[in-house]
């Protein structure tokens, strides 16, 4: 008995054969083309990278922070002692009669003077060889400020007492060096003035110029006696109690930030190199096909076991059946080709589960396993390895190769008809192109409401291309995170080339597809089986189904 209204428009005028002569237009066109989705902005794109690659970012962040902490904690502790001195009037100012002095230039001059090797050598002598001049120069850091007359000397070593001694003695050595240098400069000026004075006549010495020269000599002699070189020691350095470095906490925080940056950069590179389709929206934009169903990741699907009747996985295939039933078309759909771009994307599972969902809801469905390059599950279960589709195409009767498999949990004891692939022949493409294959499809469409064909992947094998001309529509099975953009484009190109009627795609491993699991997490009555209506108990007992689940 045929139920054409299950999958066709009420006003369809197709005679059940026209779909091969004039393939139906792609479903994307029926809906007005592929949806236009705006390209993500910079922030949104960055957030998508973080959301998809957060384990890599987190691992890089924590690893870098831990490495920075470990390296910092194992470094030798360093102690910094601070001495300070004040700089003021120099011999240059005295010799210049107190003219204008550029403070920035003075600060820069003192900073360079404090770095002279002679200061480190003098400090080493003052410390009686406790530190070499090279060690002292490496340990000292000079901090100057043009807005202040105070210069800070910081000495850093592994010994706090040694750091304090170096800072203090370095300051005193610099003051002594400055005093000696200033005194020598002033003495040279005095000697030059006295030579000029000695060359004057008595009348010239009494003249204004001679008197001014005598006053200048007196000023220089007074300055020589009180000259400090423009530097005064303010404070000795004290031995620090706590080390200035390393700081494991600070280094770990810096490592955390650096690790996050490096992790994000690595994630961005991996994201750019990964060509796999990552979202359902990206799948729709790339292919132009609507997604008819989103199937969550499921252990039951991976193991090939029966699905609970009220489960997210079973509901996904029922939704796929409903999508095929209600979308707008101009010709009836009597056969479906289920294919994919590559193996491992769930093509055969989708074909089998869709057929089971249709059969359990009362549709007369036959599953034609046309992928002769793999052993069908039904063959192994029913022991039909020597028959199947290949056996029929070389001469067996159809009744000898069809299998009846019970599905569902209803009083009608509904079944699914399966035509296994059979053993791999030497010429599968030629068999699929034969008139006998064409006649087989016509007979199956006459005897059943829906023919679901499980084909080899596209474009890996030519078998699948051969099957395109035998069906009314095509469903392309994809796997989010596995199927690449190039895979989608290759399949789309072949479909366009052969004028195939692509109904849409099925997205396996789709993110967010398990959002209904919370709804189906309990049984239909939200209680134990003992509290369910008696009719349900009897139904389960009749079909031998365990209390915690039921079949699709």
Image (spheres, rainbow, N blue to C red):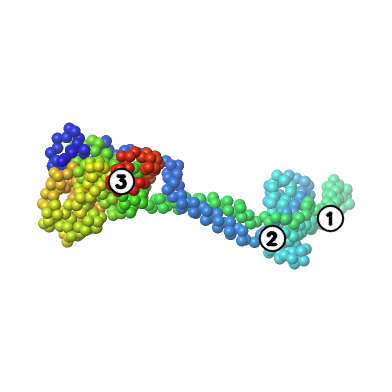
Relative image position of residue 215 (x, y in whole percent): 85, 48
Element type where label 3 sits in the image: helix
Q: Name the residue under label 2.
A: 157
Cα separation, mark 1 vs mark 3, equals 130 Å
Which mark is first along the chain, 3 or 1?
A: 1
Give SS at disc 2: strand
Q: In which quarter of the image is the N terminus?
A: top left
Q: Quick check: 61 left or right of 509?
A: right
Residue 14 percent across, percent down from the top left: 14, 37
> Disc 2 versus disc 1: distance between alpha carbons?
50 Å
Q: Which residue shows up at 23% across the image and 50% down it?
A: 405
Where does the C terminus fall, quadrant-wise? top left
In the picture shown, does residue 179 fall above or below 506? below
Q: Is residue 300 visible?
A: yes
Q: Of tags 2 and 3, which is closer to the observer?
A: 3
Q: Earlier in the sequence, mark 2 or mark 3?
A: 2
Asked if one can make out residue 42 in the rendered structure from this viewpoint, the answer is no
Residue ID at (51%, 50%): 260
Q: Which mark is residue 194?
A: 1
The residue at the point 76 percent across, 52 percent down is 85
Mark 1 falls on what kind of element? Answer: helix
Q: Which of 37 and 548 is in front in this view?
A: 548
- Give the number of callouts: 3
Question: Which numbered mark, 2 or 1, is in the foreground of this view?
Answer: 2
């Amino acid at each position: 008995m045929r139920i054409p209204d299950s999958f066709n428009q009420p006003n369809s005028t197709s005679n059940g054969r026209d779909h091969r002569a004039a393939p139906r237009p792609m479903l994307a066109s029926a809906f007005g083309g592929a949806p236009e989705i705006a390209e993500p902005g910079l922030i949104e794109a960055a957030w998508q990278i973080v959301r998809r690659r957060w384990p890599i970012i987190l691992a890089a962040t924590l690893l870098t922070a831990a490495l920075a902490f470990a390296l910092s904690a194992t470094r030798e502790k360093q102690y910094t002692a601070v001495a300070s001195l004040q700089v003021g009037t120099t011999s240059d100012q005295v010799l210049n009669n107190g003219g204008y002095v550029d403070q920035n230039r003075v600060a820069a001059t003192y900073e360079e003077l404090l770095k002279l090797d002679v200061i480190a050598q003098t400090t080493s002598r003052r410390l009686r060889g406790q530190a070499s001049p090279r060690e002292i120069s490496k340990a000292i850091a000079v901090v100057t400020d043009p807005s202040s007359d105070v210069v800070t000397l910081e000495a850093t070593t592994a010994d706090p007492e040694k750091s304090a001694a170096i800072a203090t003695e370095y300051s005193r050595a610099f003051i002594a060096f400055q005093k000696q240098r200033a005194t020598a400069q002033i003495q040279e000026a005095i000697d030059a003035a006295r030579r000029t004075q000695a060359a004057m006549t008595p009348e010239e010495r009494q003249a204004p110029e001679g008197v001014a020269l005598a006053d200048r000599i007196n000023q220089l002699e007074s300055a020589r006696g009180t000259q400090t070189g423009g530097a005064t020691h303010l404070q000795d350095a004290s031995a620090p109690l706590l080390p200035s470095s390393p700081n494991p906490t600070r280094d770990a925080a810096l490592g955390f930030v650096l690790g996050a940056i490096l992790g994000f950069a690595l994630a961005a590179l991996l994201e750019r190199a990964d060509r796999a389709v990552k979202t359902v929206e990206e799948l729709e934009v790339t292919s132009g096909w609507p997604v008819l169903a989103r199937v969550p990741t499921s252990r039951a699907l991976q193991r090939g076991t029966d699905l609970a009747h009220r489960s997210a996985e079973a509901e996904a295939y029922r939704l796929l059946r409903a999508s095929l039933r209600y979308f707008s078309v101009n010709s009836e759909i009597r056969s479906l080709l289920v294919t994919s771009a590559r193996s491992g994307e769930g093509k055969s599972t989708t074909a089998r589960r869709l057929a089971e969902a249709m059969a359990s809801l009362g549709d007369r469905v036959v599953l034609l396993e046309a992928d002769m390059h793999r052993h069908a599950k039904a063959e192994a279960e029913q022991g039909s390895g020597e028959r199947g589709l290949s056996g029929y195409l070389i001469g067996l009767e159809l009744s000898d190769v069809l299998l009846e498999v019970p599905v569902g949990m209803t009083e009608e004891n509904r079944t699914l008809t399966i035509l296994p692939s059979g053993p791999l022949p030497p010429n599968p493409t030629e068999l699929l192109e034969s008139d006998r294959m064409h006649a087989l499809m016509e007979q199956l469409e006459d005897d059943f409401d829906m023919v679901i064909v499980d084909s080899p992947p596209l474009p890996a094998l030519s078998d699948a291309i051969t099957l395109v001309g035998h069906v009314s529509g095509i469903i392309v099975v994809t796997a989010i995170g596995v199927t690449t953009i190039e895979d989608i484009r290759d399949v789309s190109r072949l479909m366009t080339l052969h004028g195939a009627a692509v109904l849409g795609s099925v997205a396996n491993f789709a993110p967010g597809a398990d959002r209904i699991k919370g709804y189906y997490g309990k049984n239909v009555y939200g209680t134990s089986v003992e509290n369910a209506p008696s009719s349900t108990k009897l139904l389960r007992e009749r079909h031998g189904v365990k209390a915690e689940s039921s079949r699709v």
